[in-house]
Amino acid sequence: MKKRKWIIFVIVIGVVAGFALILANGRTKTDFPVKTAKVVRENIQSVLSTNALIQSQKTKEYMGSAQYTVEKVHVKVGDKVKAGDILLSYDTTDLTLAVQQAQLQLDNAILNKAELTAQQEQINKDILELEQQIFALSGSTDPQDMAELQTLIQKRKAIQPIAQEKFRLMDNSIEMARLNLKSSQDKLDKALQGIIAEFDGVVTEVNAQEGAPLSMAQAAFVVKQLDNLKGIVKVGKYDAEKIKLGQKVTLTNANSTYQGVVSFIDPVAKKEMGAAGEAMLQIEISIDKPDEYLKVDFDISADILIAEAQNVLTTPMECLFYDKNEKTYVYVVKDGKAVLTPVTIGIQSDTKAEVLDGLSEGDDLVVNPSDLLTDGTLVTVVGEAE
């Protein structure tokens, strides 16, 4: 009897254990553990993060003229200059001499024409006198008068006016001399001015040397405005379509944060010299209140505000996934089940996406849904995403 009770007890224990194991195994197979995040209402910004190269808004490379010899260099690297300041003076000795020579050539040409004109006047006077004498002796039968008349007629035939071509040649000589004088004087006037700063700035490069002509291969001076700076950003074709004039930009370096706006977009993309990659579009960013920590030709972090929305529904990006047609979905946890839900999204930040349609505030969404999860799968929430 005792042996039968012991057998029944063992059977009962086995049945209970079996049910417990079945329940345990059943739960493991049907309830999928997930973490969730809520749909919340907040502000969202879409930002393009990149680097900007700091440049001066106003830069001038002064090339000067290689035909002049430098007499004096008035500035050095680091000097601040004002508009109108002389950066360089030329040696004008040869140019002054050239003007004097050109003036003499013009004077000589004018004198030569005056002499030719005087000759023409004398010829005209001689012709007039001969013709009057011929007229006076015409009709005389006196042999002596007739002989003199023939002599006068021969003299008249021998005198001819100066050809007009000679006067035109003289006029051309005068005009060429005038042009030469003007060219020489212009060169002298330009050289006397030297190289003059066109705006207030700082001298950042000096290549001119006293006593030597300027090189045409490099600028004699470079002047930049170091308190009027811009950022240069280059973007590829996928980011270029997001950039618009007037977009706000936040620039950050180790010391400070600066605000700016997109002020210029290059109308065409360009490849860098010798580059084999894709063409890049250059963007300019004007910078508000730059300070001494911003250095020309240094990089700085730039966050371009592409879009923003206030008080909208958002979901973490980790909750979103896509089908083969690029449609967007989430899993909403309802009554212990993962419900496959299509959604329409708008602005996206690095971590959040704006929800335009498909969800409500407070909905619990599965974070990083597994590929094993399907519509209607029983789930157990094991925590919320941070």
Image: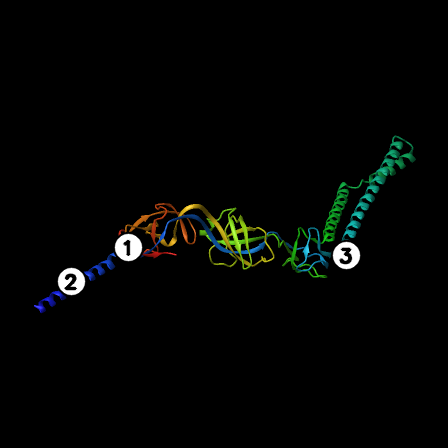
Between 21 and 345, the one lying in front of the other is 21
| Residue displayed at 54% across by 50% down | 260
Examine the image and state in which quarter residue 373 appears: bottom left
Nearer mark to the viewer, of 3 and 2: 2
Q: Mark 2 Cα within 10 Å, few/some/many (few <14, many 20+)?
A: few
Q: Amino acid at mark 3?
A: Thr
Secondary structure under tag 2 reads helix
Examine the image and state in which quarter residue 254 appears: bottom right
Q: Which residue is mark 1?
A: 379
Q: Position of residue 139 (x, y in %)?
A: 88, 30
Callout 3–callout 1 Cβ contact below 8 Å: no
Please identify the residue farthest to the bottom as the structure is shown: 3
Q: Mark 1 Cα within 10 Å, few/some/many (few <14, many 20+)?
A: many
Side (left or right) of 302 relative to 145: left
Q: Who comes first in sequence, dot 1 or dot 2?
A: 2
Q: Is residue 313 depicted above or below 129 in this figure?
A: below
Marks 3/1: CA–CA distance: 96 Å
Side (left or right) of 169 relative to 205: right
**Which disc number belongs to residue 15?**
2
Q: Position of residue 248 (x, y in %)?
A: 51, 49
**Which disc number belongs to residue 93?**
3
Q: Is residue 368 depicted above or below 162 in this figure?
A: below
Q: Is residue 303 depicted above or below 165 in this figure?
A: below
Between 216 and 1, the one lying in front of the other is 1
Q: Position of residue 297 (x, y in %)?
A: 57, 58
Q: Who comes first in sequence, dot 3 or dot 2?
A: 2
